[in-house]
Amino acid sequence: GTESKHRRRGGDLKTGSTELGAAVTGSPLTAVLPASTTGKKSIVLSSETRKELAKQAKVTKEERRAQIDERQKYLISRLADGIGLSEQQVEEAIISDDKFQLIEQFFAPSGLKKLLFFYQDVLQQKSNASLRSDGSTNTLLQKKLFITVGSTENFTGTCAFFLRTSDKVITASNVSQEVNFGVFDCINGNILQGLEFFLSQIMIPALKSQQNWGAVKEGLKNSQIQDFLYSVDKFVGTLSSSRQNIEDKIQLTKVDIDIYVSNLQNPSDYITAG
């Protein structure tokens, strides 16, 4: 498609199109890519190249904006409500994201089972930043909403997630029935506390009030359902204990033993010291 053509054009600039696209579409990378990010030498883009990339990125964003249908609008609405952003802010973040294609993969028949978004502090280049003499740029931490596979970035903020309930193709008419939405907070980087809160305050109350259990006609009276809920309760208890053990862990003071052992001369000294 047209979008892939733009990506190929970006790829002609002596580096990967994903890296260059990320530099201007607002992914957690910056326009100067450090060796620690790419595993290669730092890439410094000229102002002309950056202008061309920005132009391509703008075209790509508008093409994506034109593709937005009722399915994407449903996701945007849920994200805006769950995270506390405006729908316009969420839309702008999505169409600027270099993982935009994951949304279509999520909607496809037998597609991705989950679609994840992180909203957290990300190191970004200042919009009016110019290159310093050493090739670096001015950067700052800013809250950012971005699509993620969940394993490439550290989770430090809020995770919004969509889960499929079947392998059906996701359409405008079934998206609200076939897709579940949730928000999971990693409070101050404490993922155990976030998971404990999510399960105990949201999931377990929802499960215990669930009337329809599909093929299980007895519902909550069914012994297997009761065993399942007991297991979830027990898991939350284990999470709580683990979190408290970590928070209240005993830290032993390091002791310099040289002053104690330097004067030990014979077995009786060892016995005395013991």
Image (cartoon, rainbow, N blue to C red):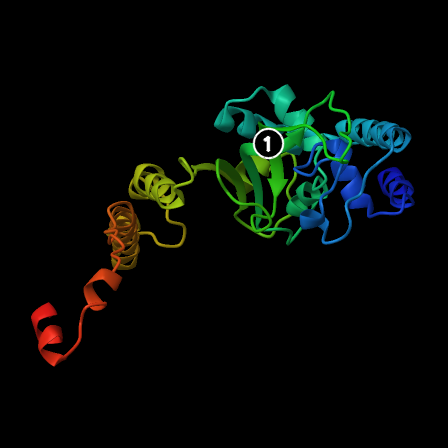
Position of residue 59 relative to residue 186, above or below, is above
| Left or right: 254, with 49 as reference point | left
Position of residue 143 relative to residue 34, above or below, is above
Q: Quadrant of residue 11?
A: top right
| Left or right: 229, with 19 as reference point | left
Q: Nearer the viewer, residue 184 or 42?
A: 42
- Give the percent coordinates (x, y) of residue 127: 72, 22
Say which quadrant the C terminus sits in: bottom left
Q: Quadrant of residue 140?
A: top right
Query: Outermost residue, bottom direction?
Result: 267
Q: Nearer the viewer, residue 130 or 192?
A: 130
- Give the percent coordinates (x, y) of residue 131: 77, 29
- The local crowd at label 1, few if under 14, some if 14 to 19, many if 20 or more residues have their Cα within 10 Å, is many
- Give the percent coordinates (x, y) of residue 154: 53, 45
The residue wearing badge 1 is: 145
- Element assignment for label 1: strand
Q: Amino acid at mark 1?
A: Leu
| Residue for point 59% across, 32% down | 145
Say which quadrant the N terminus sits in: top right
Q: Nearer the viewer, residue 84 or 271?
A: 271
Q: Quadrant of residue 199?
A: top left
| Residue for point 77% across, 43% down | 19
Position of residue 65 relative to residue 37, above or below, is above
- Give the percent coordinates (x, y) of residue 86: 58, 19
Q: Nearer the viewer, residue 104 or 155?
A: 155
Q: Count all numbered tags in the image, as a single digit.
A: 1
